[in-house]
Image: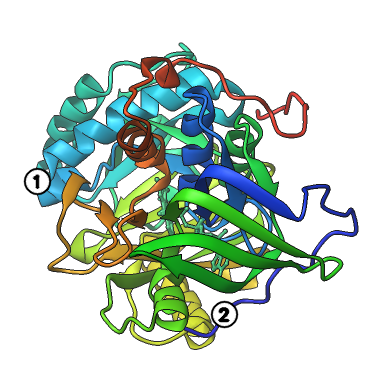
Amino acid sequence: MPEPAWPAPPTGLCTQPQTLDVEVGILGAGIHGAALARELGLRGLSCALVDRGEVGGGTSQWSSQLLHGGIRYLLTGDIRQMREGLVERATWAHIAPRRCRWEAFWMPHGNVLEGLTHRFGIGLYDHWGSERPGWPPALRLGHVPAEVFRADPRSVQAPFRGATAYADLMTWDRELTKDLAASSKAALLDFHEVEGLEEGAGQLKAMRLRDRRDGVSRLVVAKRWVFALGPWTDGFLTRWLGETRKRLRLSAGIHVWFDAVPGCERPWAIRRPQGRILFVIPRDGLLQVGTTEREVEDGWVPIVAAEREELFQALEQNLPAIPWRSLPIRAEELGVRPLVAAGGSTTHLSREAILEPHPRLTNLHLVLGGKLTTARLLMHELATRLSGSPYPASRTEPLRLWDGQTPDLR
Ligand SMILES: Cc1cc2nc3c(=O)[nH]c(=O)nc-3n(C[C@H](O)[C@H](O)[C@H](O)COP(=O)(O)OP(=O)(O)OC[C@H]3O[C@@H](n4cnc5c(N)ncnc54)[C@H](O)[C@@H]3O)c2cc1C
């Protein structure tokens, strides 16, 4: 897979020793690696958290930034995954209240029958997701009054007759990932490139690393290893372990950040064909527009233009009154999401996330697939397996803010 430009290393030097001996070595500091580091710290297990870029610098900064039950699972009938997400959504609101913001999302409908279907489905979603700590009472759910709907510029000339509002939780994905790492006791080795793996007796013993800042070599020795490399997993296993089996399918999704459009107050979630959703979300003084991803074959670079064009067409079809192509674009990002390849097996926590014990190296686990919302739960399960001790307070212990700031999220 061609790779995006990697973040340049910062100038501050790493203060870790040249040899580290830990219980668990974690490769990949996205939401999964960082959540695992926190879980291990809560259980008193030492670990090293290694990434060749910054913490939260991969897929975990390119998501739609929703901690959600997945309203679209209502359409696919995956109720178990939805309910699991709704429980985890509440967990995040408990442990990371400063990185979470509740919102009333409007789902527009084109006719009366669709409106009734939405009301029924959304009623169930909000009923199952009724644990909403910190919910602002001023936010209204359910039927959106016609005059309120018509006052939103997105409704003008649009193929919609009204909307139903449902609850979901927004976050700041990269900051949340950094908070998890800051809440761990891990030895952090960011901006470290892997230079070699050392095996023995069917186990991964150690990893040789080079600090990209100053070229210093470091050795991490660990009893157990976890690779949480997101979409880079297959490439890494091919390069370092010579494996050819593909464990992941990749799906890409784009987000474009426009200047704020006056009158667009609430986030919209528009149903599209094949169960995809088009999001139009006012946040941080801008308008974030994105769509749930679609599977891709080709690499990183060629899909950007195709995804952008597809997004513009969806916007023009659904929200024609807004001159999308002439709005200034403030930022654009493409995320490639790792989905578990068909035929994946072992311990399912949810359909989209798998913890796979490596078939040859008996002390190595692979984290495959997953999403922000369920990362804590999956890593809770893995840490319990690695340490033999569950730690229920992981659901309630508040996260530290990595930068010590209290952000103004509203
Ligand atoms: C468009 C899009 C929208 C999404 N929206 C949502 C959403 O709204 N809600 C939700 O819950 N989920 C969402 N997801 C899914 C979610 O973002 C991902 O599943 C999650 O971020 C994956 O985290 P991860 O830790 O597995 O991988 P990553 O965050 O990609 O972490 C992997 C890490 O490995 C590091 N790495 C790679 N190669 C090496 C190497 N050789 N050596 C050392 N380190 C290496 C990378 O630098 C990276 O930091 C979305 C995904 C996409 C693409």
Residue to which mark 1 is pinned? 77
Work out whether residue 355 or residue 147 is closer to the camera in this orientation and state it: 355
- Determine the residue positioned at 30% across, 57% down: 362
Would the CB of label 2 be found within 8 Å of ligand 1? Answer: no
- Determine the residue positioned at 76% across, 55% down: 18
Characterize the local packing of mark 1: few (<14), some (14-19) or many (20 or more) Cα atoms within 10 angstroms.
Answer: few
Question: Percent position (x, y) of residue 298?
Answer: 40, 87
Res. 261 visible in picture: no
Question: Percent position (x, y) of residue 347?
Answer: 18, 47
Work out whether residue 238 or residue 171 is closer to the camera in this orientation and state it: 238
CB atoms of marks 2 and 1 within 8 Å: no
Work out whether residue 240 or residue 252 is closer to the camera in this orientation and state it: 240
Q: Where's the C terminus, which quadrant?
A: top right
| C-alpha gap between disc 2 and disc 1 | 35 Å
Work out whether residue 320 or residue 77 is closer to the camera in this orientation and state it: 77
The mark found on residue 132 in the picture is none
Above or below, comparing residue 342 to residue 118 in the picture = below
In the rendered structure, the answer to whether residue 285 lies left or right of residue 342 reads right
Above or below, comparing residue 340 to residue 82 in the picture = below
Q: Residue furthest right?
A: 11
Would the CB of label 1 be found within 8 Å of ligand 1? Answer: no
Q: Which amino acid is tagged 2?
A: Glu
Q: Nearer the viewer, mark 2 or mark 1?
A: 2
Residue to which mark 2 is pinned? 3
- Determine the residue positioned at 18% across, 47% down: 348
Question: Percent position (x, y) of residue 72?
Answer: 23, 48
Res. 154 visible in picture: yes
Q: Which amino acid is tagged 1?
A: Gly
Question: Percent position (x, y) of residue 55?
Answer: 64, 51
Q: Secondary structure at mark 2?
A: loop
